[in-house]
């Protein structure tokens, strides 16, 4: 982009911020095309300089050597002079202010205040001092240069010429703010460890002059928080004010609208308001707080320490990396403090230790702890935004399917249900099957019940059931011209439509068995009829009506259906119009679902080569024979990312122990690993099944019993399990245990 355009500087600034993002505010400051690199030692500076130059070369950005300056002890930048002592006013600017003649027009006053106001952070109560000058810039005020204006003009020049040296903030801790308010304006000063960082002040607006003293003092606190938000937001700070009642502002119940608005802003900050007597407040109005000078009598004095002892101690602290690591290890990994979080660890250490950037270092240390990454529970929503498939163009063109297994075996031998749902009309077929059906029989059933009625679909969404991933099924769909879309490993939300339909179907099956008795397969046809003839919110009609263009006649409302007189082209047009309406309703429902699902979720992206941790048991409802040990880690790894598959799925480099597991996972099952590359927990010590669940083995049968139901008796056995968390006893169905662990019953009968 050429620099002649208006937005060119902003675009270039954005580019530089993105390029230098890894080092910003660590040892790099960027302003448009100026790059400042600051360090604490020559060796460190050489390393920082090399990193920045390599970064620029990688991004094909070049710095002209004639415009570069290296190894400077002092830098002139944006009208300031920065060196090891702190921030100074540029002497060239001071000279211009010092030689400024007395203003004779409001325009000249504005020019002077514009230059002087640029350095207002160096002058305490700047707005109060400049009040006589700013009054003359008002249109309603006659220009009369009097003694007050001359005194203010000379005082500003004097304070700018003798301005103090401001310190640069070290880390984000120990900030203290002193606030004061009067009828002239608001003033505040920001300090850190007894050093002044900045001054700020402003005059009162017209309506603010009518505020009560309480509101004025509270307005001073709010003014300080707003103007220094970049320093104070996200860190704990202390605010001193000479208005004692402000200490309890957060606990007051009766507040006006203005105070409620300000209190809401205060709750965004981790600040504590304390009372400070007016005579001790460093930003109090000097004239109103002035007291007679009291004589100081010194009986004896002896100073043995160097004046810069504190600075020497801080320099020594910055060079003790091994000591910091040792302190963090003891406070995090020992038996007396077992893997606390970053906040708890910081609060425990801050009473005894301090170093620059301590809170940030502790957060980074805890983030790199591999044990914490593997065992800590997540308390936020899974990562990754909702990805929705496209809306189908016609009925039964795109379908989804899944199986309900482990149902009670019926007299006809059925123990499973094949659920097939149309993604456009939401109409469904529930086919009773046996779990041991071969793929040839399932394919015949699919052709007779689905293709013969609705034609060949263009795509099928399903999970990674072994029947759907088999070569026979894949070859059949390829021959029919149907695209098979399989979900990512251990992420059933991909086929959310089938999962939701199964939930409704199971509820209806339970209701029928409770109300009418008998085996569930006898109720299945009428359950399918009831499901297809009931109202669906997403399409705002019944699936039967969406599929056939009219409501179905039922025993409940048979009088409501009249004979249809629509024939020929009118019927075709009406059907097409209904499909268009259904598509628009589905789009609205998808938008609502996406907004709800993405609420408080954040997109998470990885790069090829990143190391991530894999969630071991990533879904609820763990089956009986795959219980997860409570004391086992929640994540395993780390594993390297080989490829990105779509917007929210990644292919991992899995070890030999997990060769039977599909290597593509949804981003919600992954977590970035910040630990060192040489740290990894061996999988053979954890014992994980192919379905990413922990292994627990039954040891022996402890007891036998019978579970009494309304119409049947089920033999059950008490089993002792052995796993990561030790022995555990559960009651299981005898027939299932005999089928899965026959050796236990051989041992039991022999004994």
Image: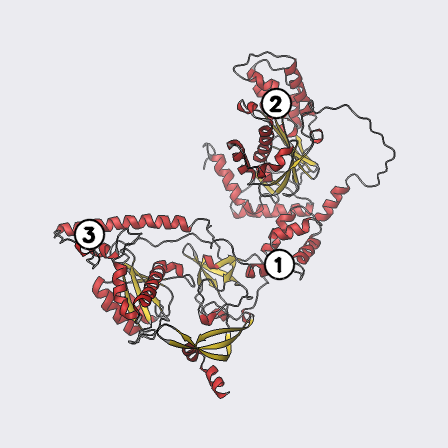
Q: Which residue is mark 3?
A: 575
Quick check: 402 above or below 386?
A: below
Q: CA distance from mark 1 to mark 3?
A: 63 Å
Image quarter of residue 115: top right
Q: Which residue is mark 1?
A: 339
Q: Secondary structure at mark 1?
A: loop
Label 2 Cα neighbours within 10 Å, binned few <14 / some 14-19 / many ≥20: some
Q: Position of residue 569 (x, y in %)?
A: 13, 51
Label 1 Cα neighbours within 10 Å, binned few <14 / some 14-19 / many ≥20: many
Quick one: 53 or 414, which is closer to the camera? 414
Q: Earlier in the sequence, mark 3 or mark 2?
A: 2
Q: Position of residue 76 (x, y in %)?
A: 64, 33
Quick check: 641 above or below 6?
A: below
Determine the residue positioned at 56% across, 38% down.
Answer: 266
Quick one: 436 or 457, which is closer to the camera? 436
Q: Earlier in the sequence, mark 2 or mark 1?
A: 2
**Residue 184 numbered mark, or none:** 2
Quick one: 151 or 540, which is closer to the camera? 540
Determine the residue positioned at 54% across, 22% down.
Answer: 206
Q: CA distance from mark 3 to mark 2?
A: 75 Å
Determine the residue positioned at 65% across, 57% down.
Answer: 332
Q: Are marks 1 and 3 in contact (CB under 8 Å)?
A: no
């Amino acid at each position: 982009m050429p620099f002649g355009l208006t937005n060119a500087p902003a675009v270039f600034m954005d580019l530089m911020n993105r390029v230098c993002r890894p080092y910003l505010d660590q040892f790099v400051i960027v302003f448009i095309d100026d790059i400042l690199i600051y360090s604490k030692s020559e060796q460190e500076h050489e390393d920082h300089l090399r990193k920045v130059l390599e970064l620029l070369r990688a991004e094909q950005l070049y710095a002209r050597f004639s415009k570069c300056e290296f190894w400077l002890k002092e830098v002139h930048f944006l009208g300031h002079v920065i060196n090891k002592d702190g921030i100074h006013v540029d002497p060239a600017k001071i000279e211009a202010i010092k030689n400024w003649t007395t203003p004779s027009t409001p325009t000249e006053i504005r020019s002077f205040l514009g230059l002087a106001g640029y350095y207002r952070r160096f002058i305490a109560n700047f707005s109060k001092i400049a009040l006589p000058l700013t009054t003359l810039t008002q249109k309603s005020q006659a220009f009369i240069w009097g003694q007050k204006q001359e005194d203010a003009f000379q005082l500003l020049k004097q304070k700018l010429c003798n301005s103090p040296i401001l310190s640069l903030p070290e880390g984000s801790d120990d900030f203290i703010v002193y606030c004061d308010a009067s009828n002239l304006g608001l003033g505040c000063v920001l300090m850190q460890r007894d050093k002044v960082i900045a001054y700020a002040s402003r005059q009162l607006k017209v309506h603010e002059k009518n505020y009560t003293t309480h509101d004025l003092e509270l307005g001073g606190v709010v003014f300080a928080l707003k103007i220094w938000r970049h320093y104070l937001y996200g860190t704990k700070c202390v605010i001193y004010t000479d208005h004692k009642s402000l200490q309890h502002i957060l606990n007051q119940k009766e507040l006006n609208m203005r105070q409620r608005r300000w209190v809401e802003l205060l709750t965004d900050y981790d600040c504590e308001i304390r009372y400070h007597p007016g005579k001790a407040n460093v930003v109090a109005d000097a004239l109103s707080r002035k007291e007679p000078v009291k004589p100081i009598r010194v009986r004896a004095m002896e100073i043995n320490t160097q004046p810069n002892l504190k600075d020497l101690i801080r320099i020594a602290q910055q060079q003790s990396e091994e000591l910091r690591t040792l302190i963090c290890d003891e406070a995090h990994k020992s038996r007396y403090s077992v893997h606390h979080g970053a906040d708890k660890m910081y609060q425990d250490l801050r009473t005894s230790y301090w170093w620059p950037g301590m809170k940030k270092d502790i957060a980074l240390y805890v983030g790199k702890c591999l044990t914490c990454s593997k065992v800590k529970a997540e308390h936020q929503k899974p990562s990754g935004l909702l990805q929705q498939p496209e809306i189908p163009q016609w009925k039964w063109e795109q379908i989804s399917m899944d199986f309900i297994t482990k149902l009670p075996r019926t007299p006809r031998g059925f123990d499973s249900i094949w659920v097939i749902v149309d993604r456009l009309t939401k109409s469904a077929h529930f086919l009773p099957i046996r779990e041991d059906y071969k793929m040839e029989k399932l394919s015949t059933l699919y052709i007779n019940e689905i293709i013969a009625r609705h034609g060949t679909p263009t795509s099928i969404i399903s999970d990674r059931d072994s029947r759907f991933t088999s070569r026979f099924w894949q070859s059949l769909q390829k021959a029919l011209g149907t695209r098979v879309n399989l979900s990512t490993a251990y992420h059933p939300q991909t086929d959310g439509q089938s999962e939701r339909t199964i939930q409704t179907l199971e509820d209806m099956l339970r209701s029928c068995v409770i109300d009418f008795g008998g085996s569930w397969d006898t109720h299945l046809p009428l359950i399918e009829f009831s499901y297809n003839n009931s109202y669906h919110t997403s399409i705002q009609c019944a699936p039967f009506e969406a599929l056939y263009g009219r409501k179905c006649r039922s025993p409940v409302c048979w009088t409501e259906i009249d004979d249809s007189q629509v024939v020929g082209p009118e019927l075709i047009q009406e059907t097409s119009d209904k499909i268009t309406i259904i598509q628009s309703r589905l789009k609205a429902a998808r938008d609502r679902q996406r907004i709800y699902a993405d609420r408080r979720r954040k997109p998470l992206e990885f790069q090829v080569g990143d190391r991530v941790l894999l969630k071991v048991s990533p879904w609820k409802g763990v089956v009986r024979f795959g219980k997860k040990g409570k004391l086992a880690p929640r994540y395993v790894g780390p594993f390297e990312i080989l490829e990105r598959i779509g917007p929210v799925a990644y292919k991992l480099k899995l070890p030999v122990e997990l060769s039977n597991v599909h290597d593509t996972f949804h981003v919600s099952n992954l977590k970035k690993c910040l630990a060192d590359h040489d740290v990894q927990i061996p999988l053979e010590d954890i014992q994980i099944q192919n379905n990413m669940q922990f292994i627990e083995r039954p040891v022996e049968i402890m007891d036998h019993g019978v579970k009494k139901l309304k119409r049947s008796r089920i033999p059950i056995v008490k089993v002792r399990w052995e796993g990561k968390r030790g022995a555990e006893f559960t009651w299981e169905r005898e027939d299932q245990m005999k089928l899965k662990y026959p050796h236990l019953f051989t041992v039991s009968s022999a004994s």
